Image (cartoon, rainbow, N blue to C red):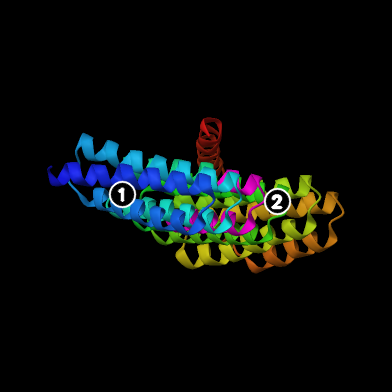
Amino acid sequence: MSSVDERELAEVRMIEEGLRSAYDGDAERVVEALSRLRDFAVQLVHLEITAEYELDAKALIIAMGDIGRETAEKRMETASIASVRALGEVAVEAVDQKRESLALKALSVLVSLALELGGKSMDAAAKSAAESLGSFGKVSSRKKMEVLTGLSEVYLMQLSIKAMEKNLSETWDIALSFLREIGSSSAEQAMENGAVGTAILLEELGTAAVRGRDEPRVTNVIQTLGKLGRELSQHGSKSALVQTVWALEILRILALRSKMESAETAGKVELESLSTAGILDEEQNLEKIQEIKEFHQHILRRS
């Protein structure tokens, strides 16, 4: 038997072991299987690009997702955390090696599992998924892979909405923090559209919180936008700073109309702390913002 055949046989056996252990509710063995599957997948990421290796790696990613869904169904928190972490590590490694197709597959499986965990109110596991999505987004930004960066942000926003609906405080806090960090990283890499997109997504998240009459989270988003704005100013990201100020003013007005006094006051404070001197002309900003919003809507329709 060749070394390739031995590897493939070992992969199949480990997939079977992971699924069987998940069905049996054996968390320890699930975690062990996921660790081995992650190692197999990472090894394939580093091999030469061939159709066979690509399909093999994607099959491993799908299998990790299947195991994760089974652990979520059985509410096995520790095993579910291991699943999203394994997927996140493969996704990040694929980005680092510029294997975009594999990164997209791992990201797709990861966000599907993340939303399922959030829907089941498994806060610790959903928080871990948010951390994996956030790490993926930051690495994608540093590699200047704009599409992957934008996808990670949209998916973090979706998970944030789920966290708000299910009152998952840990997931909410981590997802919100990573959204800001990715936006700041995009600005640092001179990826202006990515930074603008972050401010747009935070505005949409804040608007959803207003609709849900959730003043503490409206205030969270406003304060996050203020911190993002100060970081954008340091990076000289003028167009994104305009969108951030715009988002703050919209949320401040919505908070005022909804009689959310604390959130409205927070909006005033953050607006006063920001300066938009030297911004691009308004028409140019509107065109850029509309293009990015259309990109977001396209992603949301697909997912």
Name the residue: 78% across, 60% down.
263
Q: Is residue 251 left or right of residue 279?
A: right
Name the residue: 53% across, 38% down.
296
Residue occupying the far right of the picture: 259
Q: In this view, does 155 lie to the left or right of 255?
A: left
Q: In this view, does 18 lie to the left or right of 120?
A: left
**Residue 61 located within the stretch drawn in magenta:** no
Mark 2 → mark 1, Cα distance in angstroms: 33 Å
Which is in the foreground here, disc 2 or disc 1?
A: 1
Regarding mark 1 in the picture, which secondary structure is present there?
Answer: helix
Q: Where is residue 33 in the image (x, y as percent from the top left)?
A: 39, 53
Residue 140 visible, this orientation: no
Regarding mark 2 in the picture, which secondary structure is present there?
Answer: helix
Residue 77, image quadrant: bottom right
Residue 13, image quadrant: top left
> Which label belongs to residue 41?
1
Marked residue nearer the N-terminal end (2 or 1): 1
Q: Which amino acid does label 1 sit on?
A: Ala
- Residues rendered magenta in the picture: 114-136
Q: Which amino acid does label 2 sit on?
A: Met
Name the residue: 79% across, 59% down.
264
Q: Which residue position holds label 2? A: 164
